[in-house]
Structures are given as structure tokens and as C-alpha cells.
Image (spheres, rainbow, N blue to C red):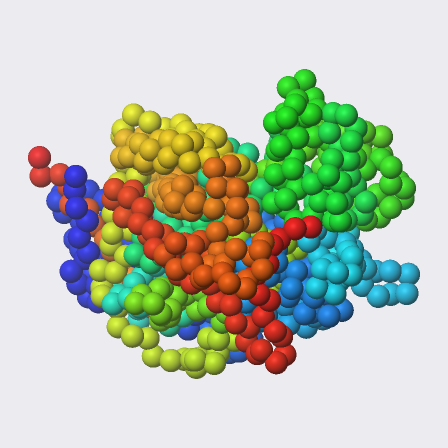
Amino acid sequence: MASVRVASRLLSKRVLPKTKAISTQYPVVDHEFDAVVVGAGGAGLRAAFGLSEAGFNTACVTKLFPTSTNVLSLGNMEEDDWRWHFYDTVKGSDWLGDQDAIHYMTEQAPAAVVELENFGMPFSRTEDGKIYQRAFGGQSLKFGKGGQAHRCCCVADRTGHSLLHTLYGRSLRYDTSYFVEYFALDLLMENGECKGVIALCMEDGSIHRFRAQNTVIATGGYGRTYFSCTSAHTSTGDGNAMVTRAGLPCQDLEFVQFHPTGIYGAGCLITEGCRGEGGILLNSEGERFMERYAPNAKDLASRDVVSRSMTIEIREGRGVGPEKDHVHLQLHHLPPQQLATRLPGISETAMIFAGVDVTKEPIPVLPTVHYNMGGIPTNYKGQVITHAEGKDKVVPGLYACGESACASVHGANRLGANSLLDLVVFGRACALTIAEEHKPGEKLSPLAPSAGEESVANMDKLRFANGSQRTSEIRLNMQKTMQAHAAVFRTGAVLKEGCVKMDAIYQTLDDIKTFDRGIVWNTDLVESLELQNLMLNAVQTINSAEQRKESRGAHAREDFKNRVDEYDYSKPLQGQEKVPYEQHWRKHTMSYVDPKTGKVTLEYRPVIDNSLDEQECAPVPPAIRSY
Amino acid sequence: MARHSKLQKQVLVLYRHFLRAGRDKPGFVPRIRDEFRENAGIKKTDVMHIEYLFRRGQRQLEQLRDVNTKQLGSFSKPADKS
């Protein structure tokens, strides 16, 4: 295999002469900015223009045009007591969320709504002009004792879409430089510090190195590791993979949220807002089965609870359809006018993807992979951290926000609608932290001339790959394995088998075959790069899941049905002996992968149980989680 | 010698703009020359292709002119010695 060498005289006026000894040459354009943001979804856009607003010369590198990225979900931003929202989120995370980050997010929530409203986001309104707020899963009043909360501000049923357009429109006021259809390959790391990003311009095949004092990763989740997911084809965990290849850990990847209502077959999302407006889930007997599983919250229990209930119903033979493998979501008992005003988008989605008229028939739904609670570990300020010798350590120059980050506000399970709040709050937090620690126009630290060489070598290897397995074949194998072995309910033996299979599939990457040898708009190459990224995410997910011998939040083990905390919270604490840290599971998983072998190493990090200010917001001690 | 067509004149203007923009930034001029020389072989009648490269060139020129673009280098793969 030919090795790649850098041009020895980068600063001379002549590029290496084109002698017969060179077979392929990749031009590398160097850019210098104060900050570079990777990803232009909700969090990326918010971070990018937050930085531009603060005077930083900012670049935003994205593989998709900003408004075509995938932002689902509703916005959970409340106007009543944020401490109740804080309690709901901590409980929803099954006490794996870091309470300082949750405190930060929920306290900022009302300000975030106001800010978005000022940007022009067209929230749905009530008759008297106030912002319409609907019920959403897992949201309660008075710390769980006051019944269902109606605190989710929304824009009909397309809040995510609207958020994206609002942020994009707003971002045009600032002079952020957008690099659209540039695929970020890797981080430029030197001595444990992040100095920028190297990316491939898909339009002309040139390589670009974006040197910056501050790099913000906002690349989203990795739903596409599974066969059935609600995410776009581009949800490939690029940021997580870049961080893994840089030798840094990813956190809590085993926590994958299965959204209860994805359309059976197509996988398209039917928003939780349907249930918020009064929609109910029915089994083959026409029974509203959620009453049995969550007597108080019923259909608006937390997502993991609902997904598990649906799976149990199907397993016990009460599923609907010819194969009895899904359930029904009924909306036709609601007034058609309400459906048309509050849920127009899903009416159309259900018609297009399921052929169902929601005013007459129920929608066939199934729990579908929707969100990744885990990701790149950060502190509440958005700085990426590692954990060594019992302490958190900040990685200089690197930040993360949005779904790709794990602050961790969602812990083991995310409440519906907290995602959009997470995007805007932490996108802004990254910008604020950078503004606090740095000034615009700061001199860049020197970078080795050959930085990024391995990334280009890897890309070149994939471009000319001539093995025997196509990218699509390997990808399908991975997706089917993950779907079969790391789904809603997980068992030790099945997970172990999955780990072995995934390891074998990882090795087949060496045998990959690509067809397009060009460099301009080589989608075969980009999909193969995305597959490499997906694989890194998948092996970490399944190995972390296999190791975690308890059930917590979205990670449900049939062989370990209970949570294993430092105390048994189902009994009074008096007289209980504290379980040592090594033996309980109320801790974050930190996973590393050796990209050459696919071997996963796991370490652990304690959960942060104190809030930012005990007086303002008392932390919530762990308790049993029931709805 | 036949006079240049309108499109040819536009390409020449673009070439001049490129050379001017790349003058003070290391590494660009040789690559600009190479790229234009390579594409000079495209048939005059293949207007679609030429216009596509022209539009792309305009975008690349904008990027070259940007103050944040600093220099051009390259990573090369030596041909197999076998």
C-alpha cells in the first residue's frame, strides 16, 4: 500500500513537481479562523452566530445545507416554575444526568423561549396571544405531585423545522463563513489540544484545513446504526467518530432512545405532541394499555416506559396487523378541527407514509430509534472533557453541543422536547464560554505542516478500495445486527453475541469495495467514510450495553431488571450500607476504540449530583422512578 | 488565428483574476496554472462542461479572495514502486 507524504516545501511557490513518481495529489487549502463549528443543525447554527455576534471570525463547516438538516422534536420551554422542570428532567434521566448541567439548562429555558420569539420563531398562539403550550411526556407540576404540566411551547407540530429556519434566517445577519457540502474528516489534534478540523470539499474534491483556536462539534446523533430509525440518512455520528479517532472518550453511548411512535415500516416520526393533544395507544383488543403500565401519566409517561410497554404488548401477542408486530395510535376521537390546527404535519405524514386518514383510522406505530442520549462528554459550559485520576479534565480548544454532546442533561433517558432546549441553550453556552476564555483575533498556535495526513491517507484508501464487500452490504449487516441485538429489551447472551458479530463486521471494513474513483462529488466515498463513523459508534454502543448490568432509563436488561445504585432506593435508607463505586452502576460509561482493531475499552466516571447553586435549586436525591 | 469566443474571453478574465488573487498567498499560482492548463483541452463546443467549470471556478475564486484563506499545499501519494 502506498504511503502518503506531505509536500516538503509547503511555503515555497512551487507545489511538488508532477513527476512520474507521484500517482495522486490532493491539494490542501489552509484557512484560519477564530472559531470553527462543525455541523449546521440547531446547535451548530446557534453556536455559530453566537460566536459571530461576540466578534469571533467564525467558520461553519457542514456536509448539508443548513435548513436541510434533520431537526425533529418539540421545544420544551416553560413559563412556570423551572424547578419543577428541573425535577422532571432529573427524574427522566433516571438519575444519570449531571444535575449542574440540568440546572443550567432548565434555568435558562424561559430566556431561551423569549430569545427565539425575538428571532421571529412563529410559535402557535392561544386566543389571547400568549404562546400555546401543550402537554408532553414526563412533564409534571409540583415535583411530580401536581399532575400533567402543559409547558411545551410549540409551532403546530413542526417546531424543529421552524427552529432551524428561524436560526438560519437570523444567522445570515452575521458574517459567519459557511462551508456547505464540506465533509469533516477529522480533528487536528496536537499535544492533546484541538487546533482545528480537516474537511473534504465534496464539490471539487479539495482538502481544507480549518485552523482555529476553538472548535465546536455539533454534528448530531447516529440513528443510522440501526435498521429502523426516525433519523435522516445523514445521521451518522461523524463528530463522535472524530473524537474517538482523536483518542478521546465518548460517554453513555448505550443509551439509545426508542421513540414510541415511529410509523410501522417507514420509520417516520409521529410526534409525541399527538399524545399530548389526546391521542391514545391501543392494542389488538382495543384497550388503552398504557393505563396498566403507567396509571398516572398513561400515554404521556416517559418515552422509555411507553416503548417498553408497547414492546411487551406485542410480545404477549396483543399486537395489531397481520403479523401482530405493532400497535395503533388513535387520533380520530379528537375534533378534526384540533387535528387540523395543532397537528397538520402528522396528518400529512400519516397519509403519505402509512396511507391512513387520521380522522378515520388509527396510525400503525412501533418503537423506533430516535435519539442518542450519549455522545461527546462535556461539562455544563460546553467544554469537552476526559476523565483521568478521578478528575474531569478539559480538552483545550474543543467544545461540543446538541445531540452529539453529552453534558449530560438527558442521562439515561431524554424527556420529549428537552432536545430543542438543549440545542439552543448549549449552543449559546459554547459561544459564551469561548467568549469568556478567548478574544477574537488571538494568534493561532503553530501547527505541524503535515497535520491531517492520516485522514487524507484513510480517505485515499477508501477511494481506491477494491475488496469484495460493498459499502451498502456492510452497512446493512451492521444495521440488522444492531436492531436484533441492541433493541428496546436487551439480554446478556444476545448482547454478547451482538458484540462478537459487530467485531466481525468491523473487520470487514478492511475488505470494503468502492466503485467511484473520482474525487468530485464522490458519494460512494462519502458514504464509506460515514460507514466508518457509524461503525465506531455501533461498537461502542453495543459493548457499553453488554457491560452495563442493570436497567436504567432507556437501557432495559431482561436479565438485570433493576437499577443498581449506591443504595437501594426502594427501601428506606436507614441502616443501608453504601455500595462501593466499582460495584454499582450509577455512573457514566466512557468508551474508547482503537480504530485499527475495533477493540473497545470502557472506563467510568461519576455522575455530578450537585446543582450549580444549592440555595437556588436544591439537587434531587435519587428515588424510584415511576409514572 | 480565430478570435476568442465570448466564453473563451470570460475564461481568460477568470484566469487573470485568479492569478491576481493568488499572487500573495503561497502555493496557489502553480496549481491555478496546472488546473487551467489541464482543462484547456476541453473542446470548444462542450459548452455545458465549460460553463460548469466556470461557475465552480467563480466560487473557488471567491474563496481564494477571502481573507481567511491562507495558503495551498498538497499531500501526495507516491506511485507504487512495485
A461 or A491, which is in the foreground? A491
Q: In which quarter of the image is residue A331?
A: top right
Q: Tell me: residue A559, above or below residue A246.
A: above
Look at 48% across and 67% down and name the residue there.
A608
Is residue A360 visible in the rendered image? The answer is: yes
Check the picture and name the quadrant holding the N terminus of chain A: top left
Q: Quadrant of residue A475?
A: top left
| A170 left or right, relative to A582 | right
Q: Quadrant of residue A485?
A: top left
A163 or B7, which is in the foreground? A163
A572 or A237, which is in the foreground? A572
Q: Residue furthest front?
A: A575
In the rendering, at what x and y percent does residue A382 appear? 48, 68
In the rendering, at what x and y percent does residue A422 appear? 59, 61
| A249 left or right, relative to A13 | right
| A567 left or right, relative to A581 | right
